[in-house]
Amino acid sequence: MRRKLKPSDTSNIAVIEKIDEAEIQALLDENYMRYTFAVMEDRALPDARDGLKPSQRRILYSMHELNINFSRSTEKCALICGHTSGYYHPHGDQVLYPTLVRLAQDWLSRYPLIAKQGNFGNLDGDPPAAMRYTEAKLSRYGEMMLADLSADTVDMMRNYTEKKDEPTVLPSLMPNLLVNGGAGIAVGVATTLAPHNLREVVEVIKAYIQNPNITVDDVIKLMPGPDFPIPCMLRGQSGVRSYYETGRGGLQFDGLYETVQSSKGGDIIRVTSLPPGASPEQLVTQIKENVERKTIEGIVNFADYSARDKKTGKIQIHVEIELSKGASAEFIITQLLKLTCLRTSFNVNQTVLIGGRVFENAPILKLIETFVLHRKDVLTRKFQAELKANNARIHILEGLLNVAKHIDAVIKLIRSSENGDDAIAKLIANKYVKTEEQAKAVLAVTLRRLTKLETHELQTEHDSLVKRNEWLTDVLGTEKKLMKEIIKEQDALAAKYGDDRRTEIGVNADDIDLEDLIKEEQVVISLTKDGYIKRIPVSAYNIQARGGKGVIGVKSRDNDEADEIFICSTHDLILFFTTHGLMYKKKGYQIPEAGRTGKGTHLANLLALGQDEHITNTIPLKTLDQDGYLMMVTKGGLIKRSFIRDYDTSLKTRGLQAIKLNDGDSLAFVEKTDGKSDVFIATSKGMAIRYPENTVRATGRVTAGVKALNLAKDDTIAQMLTINQKENPDILVVTSMGFGKRTESSQYRCLQGRYAKGVRTIDQVKQDRNGLIIGACAVNTDDTLMVLTSKGKIIQMPVKQIRSTGRVAMGVKVVTLDTGDGVQSIVKVKGGMNLPDEDDFTDI
C-alpha cells in the first residue's frame, strides 16, 4: 500500500521548475559512447605502460601473491584462475583460463609471461585441456613484470570485494607491450600490436633516452621490424615504416621453405616454418582444396610431419609437398604463396590506453616514450621509498649509538623507571635520545646489541645507509642520472634474457605476380540456390531487346534454381557475405570457369560454409585497403555501416564475422558506399525509403545494426542500394513476374531519419499480375540490365528500352517468362559494354 505523505515530509521535496527535453537518439548515442569507452578502458585494450589488459594483470598478480614463481614448482591452473576470480576479476574463472593459456602459448607470445605444464593447445588451434589438468607458474619474463612491485612503486586500488588491494599497473621492468605485442577488441575499436626482439627494443629505448628527438629512420636501423615467435620472412619494410610513423600498417610474411630432390626424380618443397596466423593443418587443408579444384597442378602428394621437439619443447614445423616429375617448383611455390597460408598478411593497429584514455594509432616512439616515463616513475617512487626507509633506520641507529656511549647511565635510568612510558620520558629528558621512536628502539634492543662488537656493526650499517642516501638523493635530483639507471637495468635485462632475431627481413614480394599470368577480363559470376557457382565471360551472352525470352545461363537441375548473378573482373576480390553474418573472400579467377549451360562448382569446394549457411550477397572490389564503407541490411530490418578496411585481414578459408546478428535474424543485403551517398531501400510489397547514409553511424566490424525503417509485419526488404547525392540516376525496379519500370530518383524524397514507412514505388492494385518486387538498381540510360530467372535463363537488354514512368506506375514487361518461371535477380552492367545499334537487337 502506498504511504501517504505527512505534512512534515513535503519540506524535503524539490520543486521542479523546468523539464529539459532531449532527443532519445542523442541520449542513446551519448550513453552508448560512455559505455564503449568504459569497456575499452576497463577490459579490452592494453595499457601502454605494462602492455597488459586487466585480466592479464590480475592473473600475474595472483600468481605473485600465491608465490608461484619461476623457481617454484607449477600449480594447477584451476587454483590460479579461482584465486584471481575470487579476489580480483569478477567475470568468472572460465573467462580467465583462455587468457592464462594465451599468456603461456610460446607460438603466440615472443616472451611468454607464464611457464606452462600440460596440454595448452597447439599451433593447429586444438583447444587446451581443462584447467583442472594443466599447471603453470610465472616465467622468467613474468617475474620481470612484477619486479619491484609494492604499494610504493605503483598505485593500488581496492578489489571488487573492497577487501584487498590490487595494482592498477605492474612495474614492468620488461617493455612487454613492445616485445610481446598484443590484441584486443572492444565496442567498435580493435587493436593489434606486433611483437619485437628484446635486444633491439632495448637498443631503441637507450637511443630514445639519449636523444628524445630520434627519427623513425633511426628506429628502423636499430629495430628493422617485428620479430614473431615462429621463424618467418618479412617481405619488405614499407609496412614497418608505416606503423612506426602512424600506428597503422600492413605487413606481409612468408613461411620458410626449401626445395630438395626426391628419389623419384621430382622435387619436394619442404616447409620448415610458417608465417603468423598460419598452421600446418591449415596449410595442408588449403593445398588439398587447391589440388582438388585443379587451381594448383603438379602436386602428387603432401603430408604434415610437424611435431614438438622433446628436448627443447619447441614446435618443429615440417610439411612436405611432393611434385610430379617435370613440374616447376618455382611456379608452384608462387602459387602456394598466393593461394595458401604460406604467405599471410598482418595488419598493425596500435590503439592502446595512455594516461587512462584511449590513444588510437600510437606511433612507435609514443609507445617507447610511455614505457620510459613509466619506468622513470617507478624508479623515482622506488628510490623515494628507499630513501624514506633509510632515513627512518638512520634515525634509530643514531639513537642506539648514542645510548651505547652512555650504557651504564642508561641501564641505571631504565632500572629506576616505573614503567615503559616513564623510561621513554626519562631517556628523552636526559637527552640520551631525541625522539620517542629512538626511545622505543632502545627499550626493545637487547644488551648484546650494545656491546663493542655489535656497536661497530651498528656504526657500519649507519655509514652504509648514509652513503646510500647520498647516492639516492643525487639520482633523484638529477634526471640524467635517473635515466642512466633505466639504461642500466635495460642493458642487464637484454644481456640476461635477450636472444637472436627469429623473423628474417627480406625484400618485397617477387615482382612476378600470379595474377600477371591470368588474363584480366569481365566475367559473369552466377550462383544457384543449391550453392553452385561458376564464371563465364560476359561475351558469352547476346544482347536482346526488351521482352526477349533470354538464353540459358544457369542450367537448372531438379529442385535447384538460379539465385544471383554479378559482373566483375577476373582480378577483382570477391567478398561473399552469408546469412550467418560472415564474410569470405576469393579472387575472380579463383571461381572455376564453366560453360554457359554447365552447373559449376559447389561452394563447399571453395568456402568453409557452416551448416545452414548460405551466400546472401557478393561484392567485387579491387582491394580492401581503400576508403569507403560497407552498408548492411538484415532480414529483420536492421542496418549497419562499417569501414571497408575493417575487413582487411589475412583470412582465406574461415569466415570473418561481418556483423553481429540477433537471434533469428540473418544478413540480407550488402552494398559498398563512399560515405556521401543516400541509402535506398525497397520492400517486396512496393514501399521505398531514402535517407543519407551518414544517418547510420559507422561502427566496428563485430557490431549489430540499428533500425533501417518501419517495416510492415507481412513485408520484407527486397533490395538495398546506394544513390550518389550529386547525381540523379533512375531507379529501376523489377518484379517476380517479369515487369519493370524506371523512375527518376528525384521522385523519391530524401528523408532525414530512418523511422518512417517510406513511399509507394509500384501500384499495389496490379500486384497479383506483376508480382512482388525482387530487385532494384540505380541506372543510367547507357547502362545494360541483366535479368536472371529461377529456371536459369539470362536476358541482357539496354536500360533505355525500359521507358521512364512515374513513381507508382505499373511498369512494362521486361522479360517473357515460361510457365512456372519467375525473375530471380537482376544486375546492372555499367556503360552498356559497347552495345551495338538498337536496330541490331534481336529476340532469341
Image: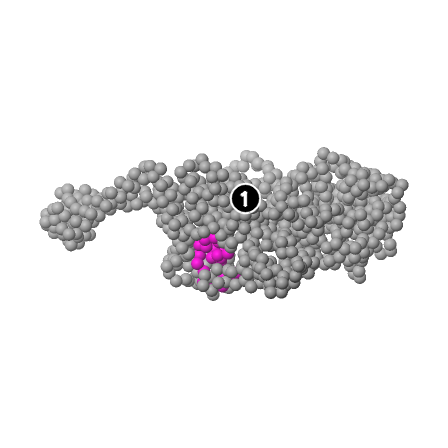
Amino acid carrying label 1: it is: Gln
Name the secondary structure under disc 1.
loop
Q: Position of residue 66 (x, y in %)?
A: 38, 58
Instruction: Find the magenta span and give its range.
Output: 100-122
- Residue at 63% in and 61% down: 266
Residue 101 counted in the magenta span: yes
Q: Tell me if I can see residue 337 in this picture.
A: yes
Q: Position of residue 458 (x, y in %)?
A: 19, 49
Label tally: 1
Q: Callout 1: 10 Å neighbours few (<14), some, many (20+)?
A: some
- State whether the magenta stretch is mostly helix, strand or loop: loop
- Residue at 64% in and 53% down: 331
Which of 153 and 199 lies nearest the eye of the viewer? 199
672 left or right of 466 in image: right
Which of 724 and 767 lies nearest the eye of the viewer? 724
693 left or right of 544 in image: left
- Residue at 61% in and 47% down: 510
Residue 340 counted in the magenta span: no
Q: Tell me if I can see residue 577 in this picture.
A: no
Q: Position of residue 182 (x, y in %)?
A: 50, 49
Q: Which residue is mark 1?
A: 237
